[in-house]
Image (tube, helix red, strand yellow):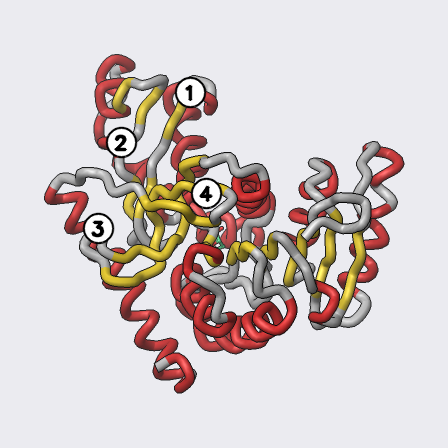
Amino acid sequence: MANSAGRKKIALIGSGMIGGTLAHLAAKKEMGDIVLFDIAEGMPQGKALDLSQCGPVEGFDAKITGTNDYADIAGADVIIVTAGVPRKPGMSRDDLLGINLKVMKAVGEGIKNNAPDAFVICITNPLDAMVWALREFSGLPHNKVVGMAGVLDSARFATFLAWEFDVSVKDVNAFVLGGHGDTMVPVTSYTTINGIPVNDFAKIKGVDQSRIDEIVDRTRKGGGEIVGLLGNGSAYYAPATSAISMAEAYLGDQKRILPCASYVEGKYGLDGLYVGVPTVIGAGGTEDVIEIELSDEEKSNLKVSTDAVEELLEACKGLDSSLA
Ligand code: LMR
């Protein structure tokens, strides 16, 4: 719903490092007016005030407000959820399940009661399980709730490949499928350097296949690498940028094909699971899931990844009986 100035409304649930970065990016791009929500009193208000004061310097027009009241997200066109706890070094994303599931319950109810027409992008970990739970708690249609992961994972894969080959990241089209955990599936057969399959490109450049395997492994563990370096928190710039590209695809009806944790039913052998797949995002939300042909090895890697997600969903149902 546009505001009186004709601008869209973007609600950001969680005003930590990703929330603040999201607000800054959305304001700089003049995507709409921004409501920064958090349960911590003062924090979203303080960040909103600080960010508003970037406007005169950067020359953007966006009303940025902070709130602790879900009522203020009413009428949001897009909601990006980062609420919850990030992992610390030594933890896996799955270790956050119990604590972040409770957070998703409160957030889902807040969305259901105040902004049921929004397009909701979830970033909270463990991603695939949390986007599923958020959908369940909010009751929104499956095509209006999606997880941000594949854009980020593919961006990491592309970055490492561009470094390896010393080429522009703009020429790398990297492809990652599956859950947003260490079992994710970077798919080299669909990854290209300016249209040239990456394995062929490696041969042209004299790069050994073992280097590509190392890059695949680094991509899988890409989030943990940053957690280890930061020491007290997880990545925020690239996750925020990735989610913003999804929000732009929705708001602009761009029909972009982005790898996202979408609801997959009847494709990839799945029967109703949120997991990373190439997804068309336009004004209808997640409008289509593109099913690609996979080799037997890729299929079995994907199965390992989707089984891990299914296991987490079972754990969620055990923790909250309303999900069973
Ligand atoms: C990431 O991949 O950066 C996020 O999922 C955060 C994390 O804990 O790795």
What amino acid type should be assigned to the residue bearing mark 4?
Ile
Q: Residue at x 40, y 46 (%)?
A: 287
Q: Nearer the viewer, mark 3 or mark 2?
A: 3
Residue 176: image quadrant is top left
Q: Nearer the viewer, residue 140 or 159?
A: 140
Kind of element beneath mark 4:
strand
Q: Is residue 158 visible?
A: yes
Q: How many marks?
A: 4
Categorize mark 2 by other alpha carbons within 10 Å: few (<14), some (14-19), many (20+): some
Q: Which mark is residue 268?
A: 3
Query: Left or right: 83 with respect to 91?
Result: right
Q: Residue at x 51, y 44 (%)?
A: 283
Q: Nearer the viewer, residue 51 or 10?
A: 10
Q: Which residue is mark 2?
A: 190
What amino acid type should be assigned to the residue bearing mark 1?
Asp
Q: Residue at x 53, y 43 (%)?
A: 250
Give the spatial CA distance, label 4 vs label 2. 20 Å
Query: N-terminal of the two: label 4 or label 3?
Result: 3
Kind of element beneath mark 1:
helix
Kind of element beneath mark 2:
helix
Give the spatial CA distance, label 3 vs label 1. 28 Å
Categorize mark 1 by other alpha carbons within 10 Å: few (<14), some (14-19), many (20+): some
Q: Which mark is residue 281?
A: 4
